[in-house]
Amino acid sequence: MKNALLIIWLSTTLTLTAQNTTIKSAEITFEFVSKGVDGTIAGFTSASTIDFDNLENTVLKGSVAVETLDTNNGLRYWSLKGRKYFNEDSYPKIYFESTAIIQEAETYKVKGTLTLKGTKKPLTITFTKNGNTLIGKASLYTSDFGINIKKKREDNLVKVTFRFVLT
């Protein structure tokens, strides 16, 4: 009887620790540095599975809807969604999929591919975990994706912050 209870307890414990975590909700904000413009983007969908015990089994994969781009200025974000910049009609979503996840002390470096306006480029997001929340930071240049708001590449820097609430 003791052996049977031990086996049941062990199998339940192993099942609980082997469960993957998913992203329940997301908040994504950005800053276009040279113009001092802050904004948000929503419409987040995720096909992510996170296994903190075995990171090689983790995949961060998701998208956001360009139509949700918001800079708190109707004329500006209407322009940004147009053909000259994000071209929402032809490219309604922005995609990210991880290719590797590396834990470094208290951070997780998530390397992956960002697809924006049909262009795929590598992107690294550095996450920290706080309870059931992952907070990530990344930087990119919009000009690398054919979105030339300013003439010089360095003036097209965007800093992105991700806040994922986990299940």
Image: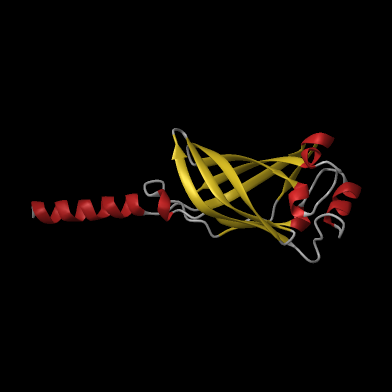
Horizontal and vertical percent position of residue 150: 86, 43
Q: Going by the image, does 117 lie left or right of 101?
A: right
Relative side of 39 to 111, left or right = right
Could you tell whether 134 is left or right of 115 in the image? left
Q: What residue is at 84 percent from the left and 36 percent from the top?
A: 35
Q: Which x, y percent locates residue 139?
A: 67, 41
Residue furthest to the left: 1
Residue 3 vertical position relative to residue 30 in the rendered view, above or below: below
72 or 107: which is nearer to us?
107
Is 101 situated above or below 117?
A: above
Q: Quadrant of residue 104?
A: top left
The N terminus lies in which quarter of the figure?
A: bottom left
Q: Residue at image x 70%, y 42%? A: 29
Q: How is the image coloured?
A: secondary structure
Asked if one can make out residue 36 in the rendered structure from this viewpoint, the answer is: no
Count of numbered tags: 0
Please report the residue visible at 65 percent of the width from the left and 45 percent of the height from the top.
27
Of residues 156 and 36, the one nearer the viewer is 156
Residue positioned most to the right: 75
Q: Give the percent coordinates (x, y) of residue 69.
A: 77, 51
Say left or right for 147 vs 102: right
Q: Residue at x 41, y 55 (%)?
A: 57
Q: Nearer the viewer, residue 157 or 44?
A: 157
How far across and how far down the image is residue 90, in percent? 79, 66
Specify whether residue 78 is in view: yes
Q: Residue extending furthest bottom?
A: 90
Residue 35 to residue 146: above or below: above
